Image: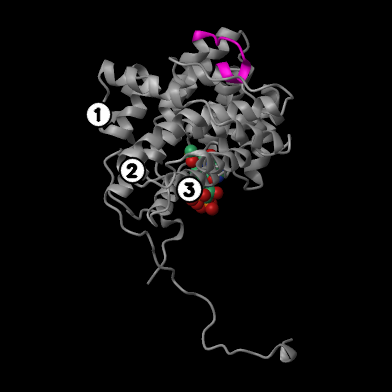
């Protein structure tokens, strides 16, 4: 038995949800480039769950269902008020999503219909709890969700308490489309491992959120913004990046386990970052980002991943940086739940082996004789 570090190149499941072949990402066989230009996030969520794009009636029903499920129980909001105001926002999300199960009567119902309903509930409720936590920690009252609007619109509305700008809604909607699914990434794998023990869908999504939080995965978008904030000016890009590269430090938002010639989602986010900068009349963040890319790609051959330009996009949308990774989760919960449903449709316990490299032939030594 020989271990493959990081399971690189190991095919651990069959899936018909999304694929990455020759650097091209598809959801249910549709190129992400096409979906980014034409689809709404709700259409994509339906596509991931059902394997086909919705009819107008099916889409309207899904939007109505999302509106119906978006409000969370008062106990969940009361729980959020008890969290420390300076709690890490992904830790808060991980905790509150786990608590959602306590107030769902069908949390333990493992039927496919109940699990599909819970997938829609989770999709509807994640934006509500992220926005509620963001307001409560500022000493503001949570804003109740709206009915009949899309996820991006509702989230921005609940975050600010104001009707969002249509340009902001469209930009966030596209970002949600781009983040919705990504084959067997670390958090999706975690969700599948969890439910493969026949644990419930809330446990699967809670595992996934804990996994997404790390800076080598979804947490990179916040880490990119920390870097942009530290750099501050265009003149500072070169010394800052050079210093990191000389010290063999990683530049957040670059590199990918699967894509070696560039992440197909990054170009859409770069374009969005440029457009939002033009609209705002301040291109500092965009220009700093482009200069970082020139240096890192030029010197290391590493290309930006999905997290790099999403940092400037979200900042230009007025979103605080510690909500970037929760926003990733608001989108990716569609993919996680689609994978959970797929796993349970043809389940087998996921239990790999480890290559043992520890000592052998040892014996128990009485405590008095231990050095
Ligand atoms: N900056 C500098 N060097 C890097 C970077 C980077 N961002 N990424 C990889 N490298 C270097 C490594 O130091 C290593 O060099 P070495 O062989 O000289 O030691 C080599 O490239 C291979 O890197 P690994 O970390 O082994 O590659 P792996 O496939 O395990 O990791 C990962 C992929 C985690 C994405 C990595 O590129 C990274 O840490 N990037 C920064 C964090 C990031 O942006 N994560 C988000 C990924 S997208 C997502 O999850 C949503």
Q: Which mark is residue 171?
A: none
Q: Which residue is mark 1?
A: 52
Q: Which residue is mark 3?
A: 203
Rounded to the nearest angstrom, the CA distance separating label 2 from label 3 is: 13 Å
Q: Which residue is mark 2?
A: 341
Closer to the chain start, of discs 1 and 3, is 1
In reply to whether residue 165 is colored magenta, the answer given is yes
| Residue 282 is at least partly visible in this image | yes
Report if the beta carbon of the residue with label 1 is closer than 8 angstroms to ligand 1: no
Q: Nearer the viewer, mark 1 or mark 3?
A: 3
Residue closest to the eye, 282 or 174: 174
Q: Are marks 1 and 2 in contact (CB under 8 Å)?
A: no
Query: SS for tag 3?
Result: helix
Q: Residues within 10 Å of mark 2 (few under 14, many from 20)?
A: many
- Residue at image position (51%, 84%) is 360
- Residue 266 in the image: state x and y as whole percent: 45, 28
Closer to the chain start, of discs 1 and 2, is 1
In reply to whether residue 178 is colored magenta, the answer given is no
Rounded to the nearest angstrom, the CA distance separating label 1 from label 2 is: 15 Å
- Residue 243 in the image: state x and y as whole percent: 68, 40
Q: Nearer the viewer, mark 1 or mark 2?
A: 2
View extreme (front): residue? 105
Report if the beta carbon of the residue with label 3 is closer than 8 angstroms to ligand 1: no
Q: Give the quadrant of the N terminus.
A: bottom left
Query: SS for tag 2?
Result: helix
Horizontal side, residue 325 vs residue 351: left or right: right
- Residue 289 in the image: state x and y as whole percent: 58, 25
Q: Residues within 10 Å of mark 1 (few under 14, many from 20)?
A: some
Horizontal side, residue 65 vs residue 303: left or right: left
Q: Which residues are magenta?
A: 157-166
Q: Residues within 10 Å of mark 3 (few under 14, many from 20)?
A: some
């Amino acid at each position: 038995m020989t271990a493959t570090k990081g399971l690189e190149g190991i095919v651990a499941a069959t899936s018909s949800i999304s694929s990455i072949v020759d650097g091209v990402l598809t959801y249910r066989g549709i190129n992400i480039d096409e979906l980014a230009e034409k689809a709404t996030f709700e259409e994509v969520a339906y596509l991931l769950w059902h394997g086909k794009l919705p009819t107008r009636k099916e889409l309207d029903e899904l939007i109505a269902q999302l509106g119906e499920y978006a409000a969370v129980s008062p106990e969940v909001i009361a729980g959020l008020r008890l969290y420390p105001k300076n709690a890490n926002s992904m830790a808060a999300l991980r905790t509150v999503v786990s608590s959602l199960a306590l107030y769902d009567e069908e949390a333990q119902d493992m039927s496919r219909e109940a699990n599909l309903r819970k997938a829609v509930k989770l999709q509807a409720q994640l934006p509500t709890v992220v926005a509620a936590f963001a307001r409560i920690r500022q000493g503001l009252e949570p804003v109740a969700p709206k009915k009949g609007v899309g996820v991006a619109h509702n989230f921005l509305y609940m975050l600010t308490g104001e009707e969002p700008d249509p340009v902001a809604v469209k930009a966030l909607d596209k970002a949600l489309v781009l983040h919705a699914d990504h084959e067997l990434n670390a958090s999706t794998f975690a969700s599948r491992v969890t439910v493969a023990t026949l644990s419930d869908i809330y446990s699967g999504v809670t595992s996934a959120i804990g996994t997404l939080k790390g800076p080598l995965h979804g947490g990179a978008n916040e880490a990119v913004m920390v870097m942009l904030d530290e750099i501050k000016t265009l003149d500072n890009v070169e010394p800052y990046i050079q210093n990191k590269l000389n010290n063999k430090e990683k530049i957040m938002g670059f590199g990918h386990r699967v894509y070696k010639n560039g992440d197909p989602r990054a170009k859409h986010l770069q374009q969005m970052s440029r457009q939002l900068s033009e609209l705002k009349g301040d291109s500092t963040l965009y220009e700093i980002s482009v200069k970082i890319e020139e240096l890192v790609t030029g010197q290391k051959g590493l290309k930006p991943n999905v997290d790099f330009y999403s940092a400037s996009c979200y900042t230009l949308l007025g979103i605080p940086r510690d909500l970037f990774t929760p926003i990733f989760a608001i989108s990716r919960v569609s993919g996680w739940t689609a994978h959970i449903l797929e796993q349970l449709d043809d389940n087998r316990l996921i239990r790999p082996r480890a290559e043992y490299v520890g000592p052998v032939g040892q014996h128990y030594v009485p405590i008095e004789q231990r050095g």
